[in-house]
Amino acid sequence: MPEAGLLSLIVWFPVVAGLLILGLARSAAVARWSCLAVALLEWIPGFFLWRAFEPGGGYQFVERHDWIERFNVEYYLGIDGIALALILLTLLLTPAAVVAGWRAIDRRTGLYYGALLIQQGLMLGVFCALDSLLFYVFWEFMLAPMFLIIGIWGGERRIYATVKFFLFTFLGSVFMLVSLVYLYLKAGSYAIPDLHALPLTLTEQQFLFFGFLAAFAVKVPMWPVHTWLPDAHVEAPTGGSVILAAILLKMGGFGMLRFSLPVTPDAAYQFAPLIVALSLVAIVYIAFVALAQRDLKKLIAYSSVAHMGFVTLGMFIPMAYAGAGNEQLLALGMGGGMVQMISHGFISAALFMCVGVLYDRVHSRRINDFGGVANTMPVFAVLLVLFGLANAGLPGTSGFVGEFLVILASFRAQPLVALGAGTILVLGAAYSLYMIKRVVFGEVANEKVAALEDLDTRELIALGGMGLAVIVLGLYPDPLVEMMEPSLDELARRVLAGKAAAW
Amino acid sequence: MVIDLADWAPLYPELALALLIPVLMLLDLAVGRKRPLVTQAVCLAGLAVVGWTCIVAADGGMFGGAFVMDSLARLLKFAGVLLSGLAFVYAPRDLREAGALRGEYFVLGLFALLGVFVTASAGSLLTLYLGLELLALALYTLVALQRHSALAAEAAMKYFVLGAIGSGAMLYGMSLLYGLSGSLLLSETAALAPESVGAYVAAALVLTGVAFKLGAVPFHQWVADVYEGPPLGVAVLLATVPKLASFALIVRLLVDGISASQEQWNLLLIVMAVASLSLGTIVAMAQTQAARLLAWAAIAHVGFLLLGVVAGGGEGLSAALFYTLIYVLMAAGAFGVVIALEKQAAPLDSLRGLYRRHPGMAFIMLLIMLSMIGIPPLAGFLAKWQVLMVLVDQGLTALAVVAVVFAVVGAYYYLRIIRLMFMEAPREQEPLKPGWGTSVMLGANGLALVVIGVWPNPLLELCRAAFGPG
């Protein structure tokens, strides 16, 4: 497969297919199957992308054309190892999101599956964009399909949830836009590599850092701007939750690696303790909140916030404590954050899908309505336990690798923080296991549970595939780490070199 | 004396339009009484010719500089033709329901357009005032078109009285300018010494008039009533075409005419812009009528585009021009959809479940609303983004932050419309059947927002060329 245009193909194929499904699909079956087919067909260019990618080769598969000439905006695509990992995650998980809605979405299917594919294309666009305005275009337009997905097919309070989701993320993003405009006026270009190279004074960086932080912190989400997430997750249909948790949240972390750290390195260095503090609050406080939830989806949503806290912790703690010159440690921390994001993508997607499986059958998400599911759904129970344990960070699963790397980085930076964060892993285990105990084990709780049917083939393939991914990544994370390592090393060098001195 | 038509080349659009109006009047008398749609067809065909003359007309001054045809005037005129065309396609459906579908609508609409033409080309205070009053008188009459409606009569009265006050203030300002400079030509009033008290008073008065015409806070009280009172078919014209004249007024009078005192009036302009942006956005949230919502939203948009003028310079003005053009396109589309709902005085609730009644229209409205919010890559985003760029470039980053925050607040009521269309069940089940003309134009209108958003280069170049190179 030729390399030129490969990224464009990956980004635009789902968007175009989504528009076609949206406009033409007249029956539910056509919409479902064509959407699934498109999501699976995406794997082919994805596979070539993966094979042809050379770690350490800088930005690859670059496509660069003029777009808005007057303001020097370009259609500029290209990926490094970080982006590739997230692209592969997106490609792998989208079919799961499609399958997740198979039973539950029975009205306006054309619109749903069309929106889902458009959403996928836009998310891939975010990871591929090397022009910051193009990045913003993908980043922002993504709100539209998600707004519809939550608002049309969501639960009872869907309107509140979706408006909150839209306004929160929109408010964050506009500050990023102002930052990008400021950078353009300084650099004369919107190209991300140019922004990386642009010298900035410390004061400028401080403002810009918070401009970017507004956008990314909401998306991650970091405490205290996480409140849209539980609402959005609880109300979203399962497919929407899968996309939200598995991929959408990763854009915050990705944005930090693309903008916050390299564009404003000195400010990032300066404010790292703040980010670390917020991350710790997220990890500790939100874990307790998760423990108290009675709604399965809310529990997983809060656990997502706590896990994403590990991501930001990993990215910033090396700078907060270890001081300058410790590039390896920074690369380790960021790598831990990245592995954690990929792993959390699979685990949270799988958990939300498990909740969807139960909800499709019982139409309840309350933990108290379940109990003894293992008796009627043995295969499902095995998988749910696997994902629950992976969520708790069981060694041998991908959840362990990410958390371990982050804690390792923390330990080298500041053992006390590592001790704190590590202890909190117990809490993660507590809410995961407590949930499993109440849902899976024990006596059959009621008639509805007694009447449950086990997974059908589609669900089994999707969940089984994710289970496989979780285990493979847990046992053999090397390919993933090797893919990202050179990009992360390069990034760490850039960040610690700083900018203010060069100005 | 032999009249050589080539000497009149800069005037072609006005001549063509002035010719079209009496022809249409006579035609309407002959056949239009019974078949107003014939008038509509001829009117649209005539507009196409006028649009063509806008393209071929030569640049240049006439009447000793009192009339100027330049790239700005050309662009505004062409946009005026396009928008009147859109309005003339959308409106008849609603006017018939309201019992106001008569040839006068088209004739008055063309008079208003002529007013826009003259304003856009004004090179002297006199031409400017003539153009504005021609526009305003046609609009007053249009608002009162539905004679038996008390609401329309009230709106017309309010519009007339407040409009007259605005015109009066502006005229007083103009007379001061004339007295101080001894010339009606804008190129000469521009040279006025900025520090004289008279010039300052004149600038304030002129600005008052401009704010009245634009509907900027604190001279905005007429906007919501005037949008709501007349039939929607009239409102769509009111909401779009005069905005072009208002923009021309800003450029010709403020920027060209009293540029010397820019420092003084810029501060006033900042206050008006921020007040319009904030008040318009906040009050719009509480509206339940589609026309009133669009009216308050219009005030907010005016605030945003004024920020472009505040930033000033060729870049700032071309950003404001781009904003104006995109805004009127969005407003026309939004009114077009509301008209197609076939509800008199459409409450927002009539948008309920539009997706089920007519998916295509719901998607077009979705695009328009996303564009109004400023979601990229739709045209509305590019408009806001350019204003942000010129603001930050001028060191007015604080204003840029205020602007984006209100853009987020404003998203709330556009989202409410999307919500009503897609997430609520319809009150009425029967599918909507807009005519093919409306369907095609609405489709083109929505698509234009996407096309301009994705490929803005030609329009950006036109907007820049309107304010000279650089």
Image (cartoon, coloured by chain):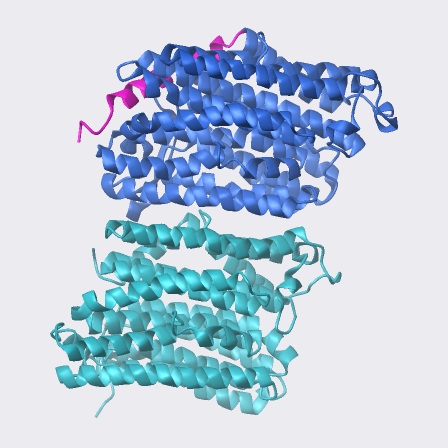
Chain colours: A blue, B cyan
Asked if A447 appears above or below B370 in the picture, the reply is above
Q: Report x, y in % for residue B146.
A: 58, 85
On the picture, is A462 further left or further right than B382?
right
Quadrant placement of the C terminus of chain A: top left
Residue at x 48% of width, y 35% of height: A224
- Residue A482, picture quadrant: top left
| Residue A487 is a magenta residue | yes
Segment colored magenta: A476-503
For image coordinates 44% across by 13% down, the residue present is A418
Residue B345: horizontal and vertical position, in percent?
61, 73
Locate residue B211 relative to residue B197 in the image: left or right: right
As drawn, B62 above or below B240: below
Q: Is residue B69 visible?
A: no
A13, A395: nearer the viewer: A395
> Is there any visible trace of residue A366 in the rendered image?
yes
Asked if residue A322 is positioned above or below residue A276 in the image, the reply reads above
- Residue A10 percent coordinates (x, y): 50, 30
Quarter assignment of residue B306: bottom left
In-image side of B222 versus B290 (left or right): left
Residue B201: quadrant of the picture:
bottom left
Residue A62, given in percent of the width and then of the height, sits at: 37, 28
Main SS type for the magenta part?
helix
Judging depth in this view, the residue of A107 and A299 nearest the camera is A299
| Residue occupying the point 32% across, 60% down | B307
Q: Is residue B184 above or below residue B355?
A: below
Does the stretch in magenta take in A125? Answer: no
